[in-house]
Amino acid sequence: MANRLHLLWVGAALLLLVFVPAYISTLTPGHGIPRDGTSLVVGRDFLNIWMYGRAAWEANPQRYYDMDAYLAALGPIVGGGYPGQLWSYPPVAMLVAAPFGLLPYLPALALWTLCGTVAFLVALRLWTRAWRVVALPLAAPAALLGVMSGQFALFAAAILLTVLRWRDSRPWLAGALVGLLLVKPQLALLVPILFLATRNWRAFAAAALSSLVLAAIVALLWGVDIWRIYVATGIANQSLVLSDPDHLAGPFMPTLFMNLRVVGVPVSLASGLQMALSLLAATLVWLRFRHRPAATDLSANLLFLACAVSATPYMLSYDTLSFAAMAVLALAVGQGGRIVPNLAFFLPLLQLAAGMAGLPGPGLIPIAVALYLMREKNMHDALKFNRARP
């Protein structure tokens, strides 16, 4: 196992030794909250989550879906001239963020990071007790970017890993956890197909019920109209990123759609190609899981997570953390070959390098991984069949 993980550990260690000191050296006092070299506050994306937490205790939080109103509210906190932030999460984010909105920003960020790290470690421990394997995903590029950004990435990865581990043994709990992914619904696009393919009706029902309950709680606390405003305005705010990759994070999205947009492919053509890729990803999940592989089948789970990345046009590099973690688990036991897990682990770095150079390509790595794993499964099945023939 140690030899198989050696390259990942070396790459992760080098990244930590170079990137972390370099990032810390860019920090400046800012306007009450330290800023980094990009002029964004420490924890950058957590600023949005923290503002959702504060808004949860205010009247009419839906007003912040108006970008001008949100930027006006940010002014006294971060100072004038701050780069634009988007208030685009679904309203369920307020339920998750509410406790953190009661704290000052920096203590809230520290607690958020600690909770996310613990949740991620607990989820990994469901898969293995080997601490050398458990610790490695915490040093993955996706984890580093997620922590630096103060993102939901650690929580999302913990949820996905737990859902995959418990889908057979604890289907009601696994399904219930899916509702929490309403904070980032693009991460759960293929989960219903997984449950349907495996005929896991209890998990499917629990996922639908938990999603409806959370949506109802939001409507009860802040009014039904908040959902209408989110659909009309919040989703439109998100679409700015997709239609204009220079607006926010085009180089950081390892998706086919955004790879194509970065090199100037028109939205209509990029959308059509992304839709074809999404259909392929959904088909692969259906074909692989209709035979109901065990929840502990690491190769099948790695294929699912590869397809989950491929299926959406909107996924940032830190959101691939569950994909990287499953790749580490598979590599530790000798599944998936050597190249496939390394590609999954270092995908954010590959995307960053290609994105900064204006080159497409990394958005096809996850589907290539899925196709390779499907081919390996078919070859294994054929070999077993031939051996069983008289």
Image: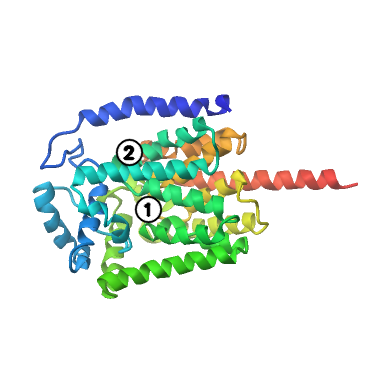
- Residue at mark 1 to residue at mark 2: CA–CA distance: 17 Å
The reply to whether residue 47 is visible in this rendering is yes
Above or below: residue 100 compared with residue 94: above
Q: Residue furthest right?
A: 390
Q: Is residue 382 left or right of residue 104?
A: right
* Mark linked to residue 356: 2
Mark 1, other Cα within 10 Å: few <14 / some 14–19 / many ≥20: some
The residue at 49%/35% (across/down) is 134
The kind of residue tagged 2 is Met
* Mark linked to residue 265: 1
Nearer to us: label 1 or label 2: 2
Residue 255's spot in the image, x, y percent?
42, 49
In the picture, the quarter occupied by the N terminus is: top right
SS at circle 2: helix
The residue at 13%/57% (across/down) is 73
Of 183 and 119, the residue lying toward us: 119
The reply to whether residue 361 is visible in this rendering is no
Q: Can you tell which quarter of the image residue 66 is in? A: bottom left
